[in-house]
Amino acid sequence: GHGALRMVGMCSVNKLLPLRTQLVAGIPVTPLPVLHGGEYVCYGYAFGRQGTVVYLSDVSAVPEDVLAVMRGYDISVLI
């Protein structure tokens, strides 16, 4: 009807680079390349300036360079 609020969706695309922290919607996000099985690389993510929240899903191995980065984090939540 008349006077109804019309909402229009928006999408912002950010190209994220492995192990490089970038702001996404004001939140620091760091892609963490990990192994999903064999040599198949997928990404986990660290959120926050010090990697406060880290999300790694269905990971078979974490490369040493990624572990080195994660050792510098102050992880409060590991998912």
Image (cartoon, rainbow, N blue to C red):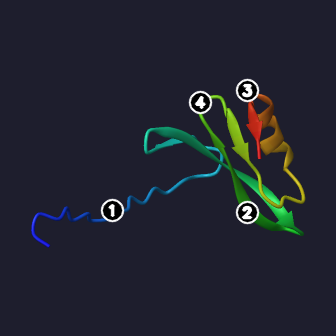
Query: Which residue, given by chain and number where applicable, does mark 2 sit on?
Result: 42
* Earlier-in-chain disc, 3 versus 2: 2
Query: Which residue, given by chain and number where applicable, does mark 1 sit on?
Result: 10
The amino acid beneath tag 3 is: Asp
Q: Position of residue 61 (x, y in %)?
A: 89, 55
Residues at marks 1 and 3, CA–CA distance in whole angstroms = 33 Å
* Earlier-in-chain disc, 1 versus 3: 1
Q: Is residue 10 above or below residue 51?
A: below
Nearest the camera: 1 or 29?
Answer: 1
Query: Which residue, given by chain and number where applicable, does mark 3 sit on?
Result: 74
* Earlier-in-chain disc, 1 versus 2: 1
Nearest the camera: 27 or 71?
Answer: 27
The residue at 81%/36% (across/down) is 68
Residues at marks 1 and 2, CA–CA distance in whole angstroms = 26 Å
Residue 49, which numbered label? Answer: 4
Is there CB contact under 8 Å for labels 1 and 3?
Answer: no
Q: How many marks?
A: 4
Q: Secondary structure at mark 3?
A: loop
Residues at marks 3 and 4, CA–CA distance in whole angstroms = 9 Å
Mark closer to the observer (3, 2): 3
* Earlier-in-chain disc, 2 versus 4: 2
Residue 71, which numbered label? Answer: none
Quarter residue 54 falls in:
top right
Mark closer to the observer (1, 3): 1
Q: Position of residue 57 (x, y in %)?
A: 78, 57
Is there CB contact under 8 Å for labels 2 and 4?
Answer: no
Quarter residue 14 falls in:
bottom left
Mark closer to the observer (1, 4): 1
Residues at marks 3 and 2, CA–CA distance in whole angstroms = 23 Å
The amino acid beneath tag 2 is: Cys
**As drawn, which residue projects farthest toward the front?**
1
